[in-house]
Amino acid sequence: ELKSYDRSVMWNSWGYVYFSDEKYEQAMQAYENVINEPEVTLPIRNSALLTLAQLNLVKQNYAKGIELILQWMDQVETVTAQSWYLLGQAYFQQGNYRKSMSSMKNAISMSEEEGYKPKENWYVLLAACISELKKEIGEKKALLQQRDIYEILVNLYPKKIYFVQLGGIYGQLGREKDYMITLKAAHAKDFLDKESEYLALAQLLLLNQNPYWAAQVLVSGQKKITTYTETVKDKTTGEEVKVEKTGPVVRDNEKNLKLLADSWRMAQEIEKAIPVLEKAAQLSKDGKSYVLLGNLYLAEDKLEQAVDSIKKGLKKGKIDKISQVHLTLGQAYFELQRFEDAKKEFRTA
């Protein structure tokens, strides 16, 4: 008959085999046998304790897993960063976010002491704990704590999601300039792939008096091709169906084209603004874009085009300050020395 120590070695070997084969129930039983042997050595018992804790977490026995990790922590000389992460994960799954947060902070600070950078999902779990405890911590304080985490994540593990999260937090904190810088960094890394992200960045750049960069961002979005889903009516059945289409991230609709034209105009790039505004005016249901286009042509001394555009605008209608529009048209006619037409427009104004 085997001695107790030999049995502990045997069960430990079987536990390893079962664990490798993903036979978790048999592995758990084997490791239970290891820790219950009276003559088991401390290193073998401690190793079995931690593995058994992990197996319980795999089987979603979180309370038992926590109990075993805490036992293991009591027994060993050095508690590792990885074991604090395991404990934090177990507490999180149990819904004990306060203890999970404390464990994750220990894991992160300990890994730095051990001389390696904390793992990506450790920060993610810590941010998730703060999110769950937002009411308890307080909205502003929670946002500031999450900001600190995402500032680390964008530097250590630069991924789109972390830039977007950090930008969103800056937005909530009213730090528009930092929001802009974060989105601009994400754009530089080619992380942006949604129209709303390009538009948000362009608007933030305009807000911060960077119209040239706003235009460049929008143009890059027009050039970037993506696959998107669109709902269309089936010609045969008449039912709505979803179809996959390929096209630019920033589409050439009236709103986007007007934003681009405004950006070029504010950047004093009138030559670039004109063709964009021409496209927007053609798509518009009112005459406002044509009137603005006419004003741009007038500023560039392109008088015939100015007259043509303003007349198109008046024909489309729904224009604000219509008397001002007639005055501008009159001015264009006057400079073309078409004095009768000019007089007529001035009288209408």
Image (tube, rainbow, N blue to C red):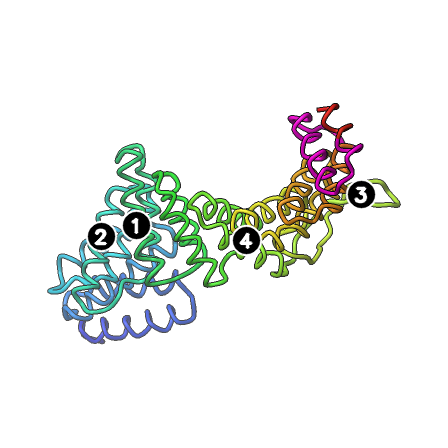
Element under disc 4: helix
At label 1, the amino acid type is Leu
Q: Can you give x and y, in whole percent of width and height, for residue 106 in the image? A: 20, 54
Q: Quadrant of residue 94?
A: top left
Q: Earlier in the sequence, mark 2 or mark 4?
A: 2
Q: Earlier in the sequence, mark 1 or mark 2?
A: 2
Q: Does residue 22 sit above or below 343 in this rendering? A: below
At label 3, the amino acid type is Lys
Q: Residue at x 46, y 63 (%)?
A: 189
Q: Quadrant of residue 317?
A: top right
The answer to if 338 sits in the magenta stretch is: yes
Task: State the residue position of label 4.
Answer: 215
Magenta residue span:
315-342
At label 4, the amino acid type is Ala
Element under disc 3: strand
The label number, if any, that marks residue 233 in the structure image: 3
Q: Are marks 3 and 2 in contact (CB under 8 Å)?
A: no
Residue ranking furthest to the left:
77
Cα distance in 3D space between marks 1 and 4: 38 Å
Toward the viewer: 307 or 157? 307
User: Is residue 258 left or right of 184 when viewed as pictured?
Assistant: right
Q: Are marks 3 and 4 in contact (CB under 8 Å)?
A: no
Q: Earlier in the sequence, mark 1 or mark 4?
A: 1
User: Is residue 137 left or right of 236 when viewed as pictured?
Assistant: left
Cα distance in 3D space between marks 3 and 2: 53 Å
Task: State the residue position of label 2.
Answer: 105
